[in-house]
Amino acid sequence: MKKAIWITAVFVFSTALCSLAQNQLGKVIDVRPEASCPHGYFTGMHCSQATVTCPNLANLNVTYGYADPAGKSVGTVFLHNGAGGTTPYAAGLNSSENYLQSYLQAGYQIVQVSWASDWEIVGGSNSASIGMAACRPATLMQYIYQNVHTSGAMCAQGQSAGSAAIAYALTWYNASSYLDKVELISGPVFGDIEHGCAVPDASRVTVCPAGQFGCVGSSWQDVPEYAGGYLAAVRSWTQNSSCQGNRRTSPQSNNNWQTMSLVNGTSSNNFFYPQTAMGGWLCSNGLNNSAAQGEYYYTNFTTSSQIADYSLTRVDNCEGAEGVEQGKTPSGESAFSAIVTDMTDSSVGCVQRH
């Protein structure tokens, strides 16, 4: 595959690739190479601006950048940041470039993205749905696969809401047809939005109970309710200020939140990824919803026949409730190092499976 070098490009996705998807993907249009990358992108990256269009959504501008390793690439790692994804993912231990530098040195092409405004906001005249808005990162990621990725495996890593963007791509938008490995860090945080928003509160969630498939480490409890800055964001993204409000929420609100959740109880959700490996990483300290919401998603993986390789790791001593990089795995290893090792491992990591 060759990189896109034209000034204006339109990418239309094959309907065959979308046959299992709940929602349709969109298009990436008006691709415009930039003379330099914005702040936060890896030094020496090649950046472009583009517009992502999706059915029934307002168009949204995005910047993406890529850097190639020395020699032939063994694969591509697409990194998506948390919250609204308006800044590029650069998290690492002691340096803003550690994940990026580590993957580049291991022979991977790296890709960073940042949206002009929160990708979760639908806009336009339709009812708000985070799941519908996830068409944007799903569309962009497949565009990167088709137009920027050059050789080897196609893989992705996301933090918090960024991990949810990748999970939606797999579960709603058939990204398992090309993704070889994903690392989902501190999330996905939209596993069950109804349980995060509904009043009265949902019960606490036991994360990794004894015997759960793929779990590394002992169980713990977390609350699914959104709080603090995340609560304000979810209210905005769902356009529903009653989320975790002072009154019992309405059946209509509860239904809307459930419908847009990653795990919404419908048969159109896809949790069968036989050619995609997955690593999940959840903090055991701090009650902020990310572990509980993630557990709603991970409980759908129950057997090795569903997924190429899978592990869900408890991380202790995180910095705050989502700072996985500063934490330790059950074996005492730095979680940052464990994630890098899991992504770059020659057997269970970012290796070509499709």
Image: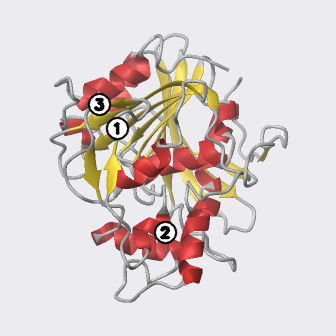
Image quadrant assignment for residue 273: top right
Q: Determine whether, in the image, residue 225 is placed left or right of residue 152.
A: left
Q: Which residue is mark 3?
A: 98
Q: Is residue 232 above or below residue 9?
A: below
Q: CA distance from mark 2 to mark 3?
A: 35 Å
Query: Which residue is found at the position 52% from the left and 79% from the top?
Result: 239
When the figure is inspected, residue 119 is found, relative to residue 149, above or below; the finding is below
For label 3, the SS is: helix
* Closer mark to the observer between disc 2 and disc 3: 2
Instruction: Determine crowd level at label 2: few under 14, some 14-19, many 20+ residues with C-alpha closer than 10 A.
Output: many
Secondary structure at numbered mark 2:
helix
* Place of residue 206 in the rendered image (x, y in percent of width and height, measured from the top left): 32, 50
**Is residue 70 at least partly visible in the picture?**
yes
The answer to whether the residue labelled 1 contacts the one labelled 3, judged by CB atoms less than 8 Å apart, is no
* Image quarter of the N terminus: top right
Instruction: Spot the residue most to the right.
Output: 15
Q: Which mark is residue 15?
A: none
Vertical comparison of 353 with 204: above or below: above
Residue shown at 27% from the left, 31% from the top? 217
In the image, farthest residue toward the front: 211
The answer to whether residue 4 is seen in the rendering is no
- Of the pair 22 and 296, the residue shown nearer to us: 296
Q: What residue sits 45% from the left and 55% below the top? A: 85
Q: What kind of residue is marked 3?
A: Asn
| Residue 103: percent from left, percent from top | 40, 23
Label 3 Cα neighbours within 10 Å, binned few <14 / some 14-19 / many ≥20: some
Residue at mark 1: 281
Name which residue type carries label 2. Answer: Glu
Quarter containing the C terminus: top right
